[in-house]
Image (cartoon, helix red, strand yellow):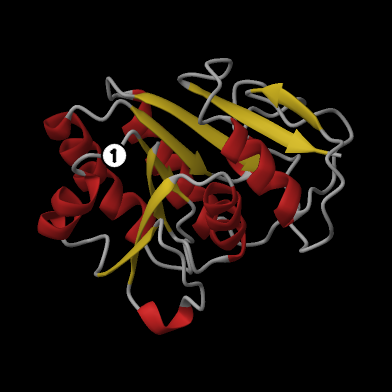
Amino acid sequence: MNILILGATGRVGKQLLNYALQDKHNVTILVRNPEKIQIEDANLTVIKGNVLDSNIIGEVVKGQDVVISALNTDGVTTLSDSMPFIIREMVAEGVKRIITIGTGGILQSRVEPHLLRYQSSESKRKSTTAAEDHHKVFNILEQSDIDWTIVCPTYLPDGEHLGNYRVERNFLPDGGVEISVYDTAEFAYKQIESRDYIKTRVGIAY
């Protein structure tokens, strides 16, 4: 399978890259700083570029079976600004499947179901900047015709790979407070072969 990973130098992105290479997939990654990638693998293609460059997005999307975005927000709007380019090029190239890493803040609130968690009293975060950008991405994906899944972890420590966690469609599993980078990446990676959560958000927690 041909897989494009965006955000492969981030914590979750690195693990997604490891899983894909372990399974001998052909993996392309688009990174601003290729020197951060210390992996040498015959199945890995490293392209230097920026996700806000629509021309380079068109090049790297071509020939892919699936796109995985583990892009960070980093206090800016790169995430939501790049998604229209990504979707446009996916549609142009006939690529139907995208899996993105979101945040538990864009799941529905249990105490105020008409609101998202970051908008409700359920949220304890003082800053909503990251959640707002993820919310924009959610809205953009909802309006598209591609097969998307947003994996929404709550508090995300490095932790360890336990392989035992709970998931729930559109909500954070009741009482869930954290999920490790490794288990988040594992679940997201499994969605490549799964049709269980097409066009939906998935909450994940222990």
Q: Quadrant of residue 113?
A: top right
Residue 72 lies, with reference to residue 200, above or below; the image says below
Quadrant containing the N terminus is top left
What crowding class fits label 1: few (fewer than 14 Cα within 10 Å), some (14-19), or many (20 or more)?
A: many
Q: Residue placed at 51% from the left, 72% from the top?
A: 39
- Horizontal and vertical percent for residue 50? 25, 67
Question: Which of 26 and 153 lies nearest the eye of the viewer?
Answer: 26
Residue labelled with disc 1: 64
- Horizontal and vertical percent for residue 60? 22, 52
Residue 52 lies, with reference to residue 99, above or below; the image says below
Residue 178 visible? The answer is yes
Question: Which of 137 and 40 lies nearest the eye of the viewer?
Answer: 40
Q: How many marks?
A: 1
Going by the picture, which residue comes out furthest to the front?
42
Residue 153 lies, with reference to residue 180, above or below; the image says above
Residue 119 visible? The answer is no
Q: Residue placed at 59% from the left, 51% from the top?
A: 22
Judged left or right of residue 109, residue 64 is left
Q: Quadrant of residue 111?
A: top right
Residue 116 lies, with reference to residue 181, above or below; the image says above
